[in-house]
Image: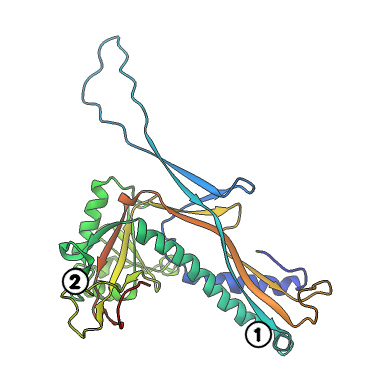
């Protein structure tokens, strides 16, 4: 972690721990991401290469004759690393009246901001890069109603698609899924949800794993992608003329379907806590300290056929938005 030379080392280490602990709690959409670290001074563009399978061999080789050579085909996927971060000024008077307690709260807030921001970047990439599966066989998301909920049937459909697309499984032979509280609520009440398969180990609980069904291991996020523009032009709007049906994204995917890129050994946001110094001309009266975070980061869909975005409604999923539109 980055440190400030103006802080006592044990205090900074404590701040680093507080920051990372809170940031880690908010990250869920990195569940199953391929992680790639690129060396420092190697440029900001990172490329992934995906080779296509060869055509199957259906004819026997001829005696004493070499087979015809076949060409390998590959798809290159590139991502560009960029810096993300935030910073807050802390007034001198505030710092002097309770610096450790005050800075701890500032750091915790920035930690949450860092975790949620990185998580949102990953979430948005999944939402834009995945293959859509609209609930109940509907053609358009605008046809989704609140009764079209996430269920075992939709999980089986997504798994079937992943299998047909030859998506790789994770260690343990499972695919993985990310859902939110609204759609988890409906899944938990579904007849196909098997309580006997729920994880109870401390490791699973720490990772946020809530259970498995039809070969998919699920985690729950409070940062679920949702689109509140559905229903504006269709029949799902039944509550009020201003109400729209919220469409929730539920991601089910295989291994190496998407990747996150770290720069060098920087695998988590860094916290920066700086107090004013005698040579700081931008702060001549030592009026403030600063607390902030920064992280170089990139995320990219590597194979959209291996990520299924199951778009559903949810019980109680009506949003009352004057004019409608937009997404979260």
User: In which image quadrant can residue 269 be found?
Assistant: bottom right
Q: Tell me the mark number nearer the camera, choosing from 2 and 1.
A: 2
Q: At which x and y percent is residue 300?
A: 44, 53
Tag 2 near tag 1, CB within 8 Å: no
Colouring scheme, one of rainbow, by chain, secondary structure, one colour: rainbow
9 displayed left or right of 115: right
Q: Callout 2: 10 Å neighbours few (<14), some, many (20+)?
A: some
Q: Pointer 2: what residue?
A: 148
191 displayed left or right of 3: left
- Secondary structure under tag 1 reads helix
Q: At which x and y percent is residue 310?
A: 26, 63
- Whether residue 61 is visible: yes
In the foreground, 35 or 317: 317
Q: Pointer 1: what residue?
A: 101
Image quadrant occupied by the C terminus: bottom left
- Secondary structure under tag 2 reads loop
Q: Residue at x 59, y 72 (%)?
A: 19
Q: Residue at x 36, y 53 (%)?
A: 172
- Whether residue 22 is visible: no
Q: Residue at x 63, y 49 (%)?
A: 40
* Figure check: 258 above or below 277: above
* Figure check: 217 above or below 292: above
């Amino acid at each position: 972690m980055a440190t400030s030379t103006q802080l006592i080392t044990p205090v900074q280490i404590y701040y680093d721990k507080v920051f990372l602990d809170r940031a880690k709690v908010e990250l869920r959409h990195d569940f199953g991401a391929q992680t790639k670290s690129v060396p420092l001074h190697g440029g900001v563009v990172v490329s992934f290469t995906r080779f296509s399978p060869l055509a199957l061999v259906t004819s026997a080789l001829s005696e004493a004759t070499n087979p015809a050579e076949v060409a390998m085909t590959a798809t290159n996927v590139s991502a560009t690393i960029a810096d993300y971060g935030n910073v807050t000024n802390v007034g001198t008077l505030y710092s002097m009246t309770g610096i450790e307690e005050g800075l701890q709260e500032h750091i915790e807030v920035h930690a949450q901001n860092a975790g949620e921001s990185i998580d949102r970047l990953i979430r948005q990439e999944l939402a834009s890069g995945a293959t859509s599966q609209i609930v109940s066989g509907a053609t358009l998301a605008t046809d989704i109603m609140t009764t079209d909920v996430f269920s075992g049937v939709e999980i089986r459909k997504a798994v079937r698609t992943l299998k047909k697309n030859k998506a790789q499984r994770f260690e343990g032979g499972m695919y993985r899924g990310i859902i939110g509280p609204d759609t988890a609520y409906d899944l938990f009440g579904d007849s196909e949800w098997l309580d006997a398969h729920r994880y109870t180990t401390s490791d699973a609980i720490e990772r946020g794993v809530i259970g498995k069904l039809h070969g998919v291991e699920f985690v729950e996020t409070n940062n679920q992608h949702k689109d509140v523009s559905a229903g504006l032009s269709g029949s799902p709007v039944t509550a009020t003329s201003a109400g729209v049906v919220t469409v929730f994204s539920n991601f089910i995917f295989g291994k190496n379907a998407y990747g996150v890129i770290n720069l060098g050994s920087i695998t988590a946001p860094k916290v920066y806590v700086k107090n004013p110094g005698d040579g700081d001309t931008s702060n001549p009266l030592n009026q403030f300290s600063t607390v902030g975070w920064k992280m170089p980061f990139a995320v990219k869909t590597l194979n959209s056929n291996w990520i299924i975005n199951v778009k559903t409604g949810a019980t109680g999923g009506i949003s009352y938005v004057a004019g409608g539109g937009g997404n979260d």
